[in-house]
Each structure stands twice: as structure tokens, then as C-alpha cells.
Amino acid sequence: MARDKVIEARKVKYRYPDGTVGIEKVDLELCRGEKVAIIGPNGSGKSTLLELLGGLIEPTEGYVKFFANESIDHYEIRRRVGVLLQNSDDVLFNPTVREDLEFGPAQLQIPKEEFDKTLEDISQLLDLKSYLNKPPFRLSEGQKQRAAFGSVLALKPEVLLLDEPFSSVDIETKQSMIKHLNGLNEEGVTIVVTAHDLTTVPLIADRVYLLNKSVMAEGSTRDILTDLELLKNNSLDIPPLVELGIRLGINSVPLTVDEAVERLRKEFDKS
Ligand SMILES: Nc1ncnc2c1ncn2[C@@H]1O[C@H](COP(=O)(O)OP(=O)(O)O)[C@@H](O)[C@H]1O
Ligand SMILES: [Mg+2]
């Protein structure tokens, strides 16, 4: 069976109005149900690419195709592709957090009664209950990021594009977000996250694109995250567990703490 492409970018270039090239010659393909990370150092074009993949901006050259459909309109893209921008202030613009969460579903004319249960679930998941009636500008960065994430989940999109979604949340929220995202993925939601800190990548992605204006490498999370030369050449920090595994000479380097525990137990048992 042919793979069901949800978003496809071909030879994409984006030049900002001041002449800065955000990205160029980017080819990328996302299939339904995938979990993909786009990694790269600061200024490598991750946010630019995510906005292009979300249809928020249009390529200067090349094209981005959604759901293998040439004639899809913006309204349908908005309904089916949820984008969490890096700057939460760009997403939260209503007088209260509750109104921000209700905004998208109201635009799409989802009946309020139908949405109330979703709102309850999202507030519970992201621990937003005590902030619902507050103006977003009164929230801390982490609280804003959770509220912004909630407003994207509220639309129940089939594709989630998340720009550095864990950058300012605490460890507990990060863990519950990761668990929730993996749960959504099991239900078929396609997930893309960008990251310059690679430690969470193995927990949320099976496949990785390394971006540095263009795609420098693409492959399994394991292949990319254990290629020290590639990471170094692109100014990315080697994840501590990978470095530990390589320096200890462990077969099949661990990418997550769970894997590290399992591998180290085996090594100890040998000796
Ligand atoms: N609004 C803008 N106007 C001009 N240049 C921009 C703008 N936004 C980003 N850039 C430039 O585009 C390049 C890619 O930026 P960005 O996509 O934000 O990278 P990343 O998200 O990987 O840090 C950088 O050189 C950045 O300075
Ligand atoms: Mg960015």
C-alpha cells in the first residue's frame, strides 16, 4: 500500500522580506502516524520550516503540498494541521486563557456543549484549571506554553506541528506532554517537534531531519543521534547518554534512561 502522505515539501526556499534566507532546498515528507523531529542549531530555520509546513507562510520557491491535495483551502489546513508557534504570545491573544482555548473550536463552529468536555480534559492534562480566567499576559512563560499547547490540542488536529514545545515547561509538565503526545500518536495523529536540545528527541520521535538551512541528514533517531561527527559539524550538543554509552564502549548506545538502565544492567551482569 502506498504510504499516506500528509505533508510534502519539495525544493522549498523561504526568504524573509529583509532578504534573509530562512531555509533553502528543503525536501521533506511526512506520512500519517509518524513521529518526526526537526533538529538544528539556533537560526538553522526550524521555526521557518514549521510555519511553512503549517501553511502559515508560503514558500518563495518550491512547494508544500497538504494531504496530497493540490486544491486544499486554508480553512481545511487550519482545521487539520495544528501549529504551536515558538513564541506563545503569538498564539494567546484573548482576554482570558479560557477564551483562548475556546477560540479555535468556536471559529470552526464546534458546538459549545461538545467542546466543554474537551476543555475539561485539556485543562486537567495541562494543569490549567486555576488559570482559566486569567489574562494570558499574567502567566509565567511555562504557563503560557501550556496554555498555547492547550489551544492547539483543542482543535483535535490530525497533524501536530510543535515548535520547541518543551523549552520552558517544568519536567513534570514535559513528561505529561510527552505521554499525551505519544497517546495521540497511537490514535493516528502525526507529530512533528522541533528541538535544538536533543535529550527529549528519542522520547517523541522515531525519525529525524537535521536542518541547517537545508536538510543536512535524515534518518532514524538512533542513526542521527549517534553520529557524533554530524552533530558536532552542525553545532549540536551530543546527548549526555549517547556520550556516556560511546565512552563506556556499550554495544548499541542507549538513547533514553530506560535503555541506559537495561544496557548497563547487562554490562554489570557480564562482569
Ligand atoms: N521575521 C524575520 N525576518 C528576517 N529574518 C528572520 C525572521 N525570522 C527568522 N529570520 C532568520 O531566518 C533564519 C532562520 O530562523 P529560524 O527559522 O527562526 O531558525 P530556528 O528556529 O532554527 O532558530 C535565521 O537566520 C533568522 O535570523
Ligand atoms: Mg526557532
Image: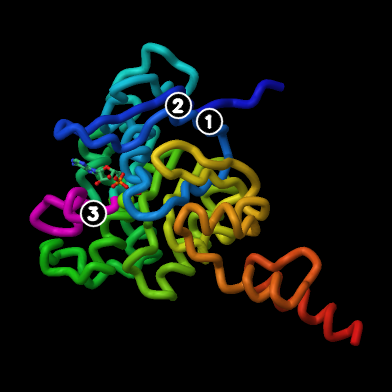
Q: Is residue 81 visible?
A: yes
Residue 50 screen position, x and y as percent: 36, 40
Query: Residue 29 has which mark?
Result: 1
Residue at far left of view: 95
Residue 269 as seen in the image, left or right of residue 179? right
> Which image quadrant shows ligand 1?
top left
Amino acid type indicated by mark 1: Glu
Marks 2/1: CA–CA distance: 6 Å
Q: Which residue is drawn at 20% across and 44% down?
A: 103
The magenta stretch is: 86-100
Residue 220 screen position, x and y as percent: 65, 47
Residue 151 as seen in the image, left or right of residue 193? left
Query: Residue 100 has which mark?
Result: none
Q: Is mark 2 on a helix, strand or loop?
A: strand
Q: Which residue is drawn at 34% across and 69% down?
A: 169
Amino acid type indicated by mark 2: Ala
Q: Disc 3 designates what residue? A: 87
Look at discs 3 and 2 and give the one toward the viewer: 2
Query: Residue 9 has which mark?
Result: 2
Is label 3 in contact with label 2 (beta carbons under 8 Å)?
no
Q: Quadrant of residue 66?
A: top left
